[in-house]
């Protein structure tokens, strides 16, 4: 009896509750956060907070509250938000982090420090740059969508699936922010005010931790991803293969990438860096109204044409990234790893725009649907 | 009389897992970071060097233990150094073991507080941990051995988690190899050696394990290389997952890299990982509670197990309460204990061996 009661008392002491409960009813989960920079150097933080109201009868309704606060640091802005809302602010489930263009051009590392430092956050939120102000994007009320956070994160996921963006979350970006010789690109969104929608413009090219102002437009992002060796669930291109047809539609061919193989060779000779990016695509034609794809000769000709077109586009992309000085192919890191003496000798930032990068794309039609 | 008093010897498999579970403990989370801060991306070479160097120490351990086949570690001291000096040495070892246990406790609670329970006071976490260890240790060595063997399945789970991170790794981060020469790598070997300090358990319980000396030596080596490979794996994955610059910021790379993975049921893999890791810490700490308690029993010539372990547990619990979360003091104390570790886990073993050799030859000389 005595033993038992001691046992029970100990259990009572040790097993009841704890200091660190964080109950759902006490926090406001923030799903999307937007940061903007003001002219005086302070930050504006915009958050969207969904609140689910459960009524005893009928369906649950969700209301979304959008708040904008200012502060010298993201954390201070958050404290200001806390002073306005019921309960406390909890960004640990944030899905999307948007940055206004002005802020992104400045430096984004200080914004993200709080996410990396705090063990509560899970680091799988996506980042995007908004052409304009992040506040406006979060204040949108897209019709037919359940909440702006879900809309934006699904929009971004759609781009990943369609091989338009890398799908890197803020965890992966951390290394790329810090490491010299590695740059990155994040989705660039623009606001379409008439339709109250966002539009995926392309990939904003970053150098170190700042947006360069240059971006890869959305019709070239798939090729950039493939050149980096990344393929989502779907990768498709529509290219103009001929000018001869009268009907404009007949000039085009649309195909999907079935398999991609990419290889990059970086050489340093006589203090000159050359990078050869070669890529082989096996494709399936999904739309080609102009002609039958029966003869081997025709297919061969198309293969050649498509290879040329894509190589040309790849050259354009590379010209853009070199102009932006955004080493998204991580050539700098390769040089650092395999040619450390050269790496020590030069300043990569100054070197990268001048190196020679040669892309080579080979296309091979392997399928053309159920009709020939 | 009763069957409980019959002492069975440990099997060699249990011996293997006791060594493994004692060595793998609180340090595994920060090992890649420690190696990286000393030797940059060459830290894994340091680890291998440390592993090879320790072979020699393990051989000495075996040579000592072989000379006294039915004495435990503290009884060996008395046999080697005569009764009273031996007791003094044993007492020093008891102090050392308890201090290692304190460091483990401090680091464990600090990490839990940092990662999951920021509001919980120090004493609660420390008390809960030490109670578990006390309970396990007072079950006796055989119970511990069975438990350790059983929970080793968790090591597979840990490896599986880390394997999942492999998809985001880049081998280029390991290069250039040896770009800054051998010096940092050798410095890093220091960090590597201290993550193996639990190996002394192989000497303490050597006499309680069945099998011929050669078989037991083999088990010690197997266990050692298992741990080396386990560490090597975690270090290599961390080094290729994080870029070198990023590594210099991240103190618990293993946890950090699991943070961003999300599954349907488990949203935060790092917390899952942490709860399994707690078991590994508990096994390590239990071993030290056991060794401290065993030392106390041998020094004070008593057979009362429960009070000895309780005293050992109190000895381990109370000093850390005064240090608490103070990072600077924890680090100071940690460095001090590491330094002690070199004396007691490495240097002193050689002394024991040579003294026992000299005494052995003297006795032989005297009798002939």
Image (cartoon, coloured by chain):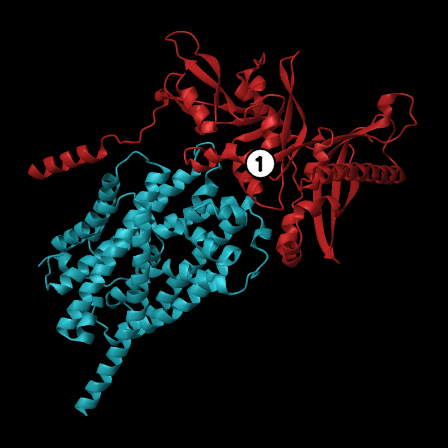
Chain colours: A red, B cyan
Measured as percent of width and height from the top left, residue A284 is found at 75, 34
Specify whether residue B262 is in view. Answer: no
How many numbered markers are drawn?
1
Q: What is the quadrant of residue A244 in the picture?
A: top right
Residue A220 image-quadrant placement: top right
With respect to residue B238, does B359 lie above or below?
Answer: below
Q: B223 and B170: which one is in front?
A: B170
Q: Left or right of A9: which side holds B266?
A: right
Q: Residue at x 29, y 52 (%)?
A: B103
Residue B138 is situated, as x and y percent measured from the top left of the image, at: 18, 52
Query: Which quadrant, please, contains the N terminus of chain A?
Result: top left
Q: Residues within 10 Å of mark 1 (few under 14, many from 20)?
A: some
Q: Residue furthest left?
A: A2
Chain holding disc 1: A
Q: Is residue A103 above or below residue B68?
A: above
Which sits in the foreground, A311 or B246?
Answer: B246
Q: Which residue is mark 1?
A: A168
Q: Quadrant of the C terminus of chain A?
A: top right
Question: Can residue B323 be seen at all in this image of the molecule?
Answer: yes
Relative vertical location of residue A117 with respect to residue B308 in this rendering, above or below: above
| Residue extending furthest toward the top | A57
Is B295 displayed left or right of A304 in the figure? left
Q: Secondary structure at mark 1?
A: loop
Percent of width and height locating residue A95: 51, 27
Which residue occupies 28% across, 78% down?
B354
Q: Nearer the viewer, residue A16 or B178?
A: B178
Q: Position of residue B349 (x, y in %)?
A: 29, 71
Residue drawn at 64 percent across, 27 percent down: A188
């Amino acid at each position: 009896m005595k033993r038992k009661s001691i046992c029970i008392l100990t259990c009572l002491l040790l097993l009841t509750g704890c200091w660190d409960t964080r109950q759902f009813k006490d926090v406001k989960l923030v799903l999307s956060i937007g940061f903007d920079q003001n002219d005086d150097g302070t930050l504006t933080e915009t958050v969207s907070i969904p609140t689910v109201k459960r009524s005893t009868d009928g369906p649950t309704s969700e209301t979304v509250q959008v708040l904008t606060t200012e502060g010298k640091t993201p954390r201070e802005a958050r404290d200001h938000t806390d002073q306005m809302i019921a309960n406390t602010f909890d960004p640990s489930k944030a899905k999307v982090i948007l940055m206004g263009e002005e802020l992104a051009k400045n430096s984004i590392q200080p914004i993200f420090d709080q996410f990396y430092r705090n063990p509560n956050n899970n680091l799988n939120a996506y980042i995007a740059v908004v052409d304009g102000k992040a506040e406006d994007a979060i204040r949108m009320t897209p019709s037919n969508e359940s909440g702006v956070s879900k809309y934006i994160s699904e929009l971004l996921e759609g781009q990943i699936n369609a091989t338009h963006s890398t799908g890197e979350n803020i965890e992966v970006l951390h290394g790329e922010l810090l490491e010299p010789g590695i740059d990155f690109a994040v989705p660039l969104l623009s606001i379409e005010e008439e339709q109250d929608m966002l539009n995926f413009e392309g990939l904003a090219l970053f150098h170190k931790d700042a947006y360069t102002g240059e971006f890869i437009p959305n019709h070239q992002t798939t090729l950039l991803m493939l050149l980096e060796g990344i393929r989502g669930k779907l990768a498709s291109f529509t290219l103009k293969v001929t000018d001869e047809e009268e009907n404009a539609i007949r000039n085009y061919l649309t195909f999907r990438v079935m398999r991609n193989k990419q290889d990059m060779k970086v050489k340093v000779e006589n203090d000159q860096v050359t990078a050869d990016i070669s890529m082989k695509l096996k494709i399936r034609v999904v739309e080609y109204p102009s002609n039958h794809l029966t003869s081997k000769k025709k297919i061969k000709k198309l293969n050649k044409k498509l290879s040329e077109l894509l190589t040309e586009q790849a050259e354009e992309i590379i010209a853009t990234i070199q102009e932006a000085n955004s080493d998204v192919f991580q050539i700098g890191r390769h040089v650092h790893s395999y040619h450390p003496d050269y790496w020590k000798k030069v300043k990569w930032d100054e070197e990268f725009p001048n190196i020679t990068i040669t892309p080579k794309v080979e296309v091979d039609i392997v399928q053309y649907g159920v009709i020939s | 009389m009763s069957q409980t008093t019959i002492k069975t010897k440990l099997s060699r498999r249990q011996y293997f897992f006791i060594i493994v579970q004692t060595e793998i403990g609180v340090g595994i989370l920060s090992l890649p970071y420690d190696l990286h801060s000393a030797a940059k991306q060459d830290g894994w070479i340091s680890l291998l060097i440390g592993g090879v160097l320790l072979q020699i120490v393990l051989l000495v351990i075996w040579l000592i233990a072989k000379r006294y086949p039915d004495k435990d570690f503290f009884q060996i001291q008395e046999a080697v150094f005569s009764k009273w000096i031996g007791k003094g040495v044993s007492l020093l070892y008891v102090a050392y073991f308890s201090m290692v246990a304190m460091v483990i406790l401090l680091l464990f609670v600090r990490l839990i507080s940092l990662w999951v329970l920021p509001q919980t006071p120090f004493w609660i976490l420390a008390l809960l941990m030490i109670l578990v260890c006390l309970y396990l240790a007072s079950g006796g060595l055989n119970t511990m051995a069975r438990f350790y063997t059983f929970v080793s399945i968790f090591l597979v789970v840990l490896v599986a988690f880390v394997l999942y991170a492999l998809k985001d790794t880049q081998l280029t981060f390991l290069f250039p190899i040896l770009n800054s020469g051998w010096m940092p790598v050798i410095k890093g070997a220091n960090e590597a050696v201290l993550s193996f300090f639990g190996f002394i358990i192989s000497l303490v319980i050597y006499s309680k394990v069945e099998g011929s000396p050669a078989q037991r030596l083999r088990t010690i080596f197997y266990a050692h290389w298992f741990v080396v490979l386990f560490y090597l794996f975690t270090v290599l994955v961390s080094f290729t997952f994080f870029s070198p610059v990023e590594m210099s910021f991240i103190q618990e790379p293993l946890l950090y890299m699991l943070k961003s993975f999300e599954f349907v049921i488990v949203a935060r893999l790092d917390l899952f990982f942490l709860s399994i890791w707690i078991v590994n810490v508990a096994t390590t700490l239990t071993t030290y509670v056991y060794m401290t308690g065993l030392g106390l029993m041998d020094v004070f010539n008593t057979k009362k197990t429960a009070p000895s372990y309780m005293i050992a547990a109190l000895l381990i619990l109370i000093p850390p309460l005064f240090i608490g979360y103070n990072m600077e003091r924890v680090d100071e104390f940690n460095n001090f204990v590491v330094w002690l570790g070199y004396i007691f886990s490495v240097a002193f073993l050689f002394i024991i061996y040579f003294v026992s050799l000299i005494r052995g030859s003297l006795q032989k000389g005297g009798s002939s």
